[in-house]
Amino acid sequence: MTVPLRGLHYGANVLGAVAIARLLKIDKSKIMTTIAKLKQPPHQLELKKLKNGVTLIDNSYNTNLDGFLASIEYLKTFPGRTFVVTPGIIELGRFSQKIHSELGQKLKGIDHVWVTNLKHADDLSSPENHVTGEENMNKIFSDMRDTLRKGDTLLIEGRIPESLKSDILKL
């Protein structure tokens, strides 16, 4: 069975639904037909090809620790250079520094990370990754425009400012 959705968590959800459907004695062919019609939810690991040849993974719907980690692992499956733009995870309270430091370790191997929320930039940074914290979206976009090229993959993780997202989609 092939599940036409990106993200391992969807596989677990579909398996659970299949188990319930089988308990309800729904025909296997109906289950398979329904699964084949599933569509990737918007802004949840949604793939787009930009005009400049960069592959965009739009995971801007929201973010949480598990989702962020899954997005990083998915990004690392792409060939070529890989990049992330994120505000970090906003509502973590007293756990923010610890969780962002852990995420920073997982970002090893990513070519560059732009962080739109300065308070998370230092925590996401580690000696093994290149992180730029910047609250001026024009500066971030200018750096992206100068850096990204055909064959690269950019992950938008979390809700970045709409002005930056709009500019990225025009690349």
Image (cartoon, rainbow, N blue to C red):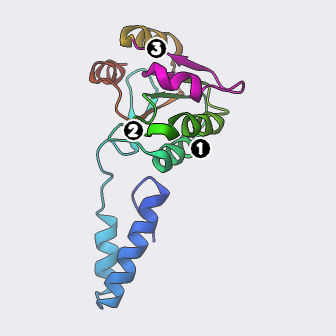
Mark 2 Cα within 10 Å, few/some/many (few <14, many 20+)?
Answer: few
Q: Along the polypeptide, which appears first: circle 2 or circle 1? A: 1
The image position of residue 7, as x and y in percent, is: 46, 54
Mark 1 residue type: Thr
The image position of residue 132, as x and y in percent, is: 54, 17
3D distance between C-alphas at marks 3 and 2: 19 Å
Closer to us: 79 or 6: 6
Label 3 residue SS = loop
3D distance between C-alphas at marks 3 and 1: 27 Å
Asked if marks 2 and 1 touch (Cβ < 8 Å), the reply is no
Q: Mark 1 points at which residue?
A: 77
Q: Nearer the viewer, mark 3 or mark 1?
A: 3
Inspect the magenta stretch and tell me whether residue 120 lies in it. yes
Quadrant of the rendering where the N terminus is positioned: bottom left
Seen at 37% across and 9% down, the residue is 138
Mark 1 Cα within 10 Å, few/some/many (few <14, many 20+)?
Answer: few
Q: Is residue 3 left or right of residue 25?
A: right
Seen at 49% across and 58% down, the residue is 8
Q: Can residue 21 be seen in this view?
A: yes
Q: Name the residue under label 3.
A: 134
Q: Name the residue under label 2.
A: 91
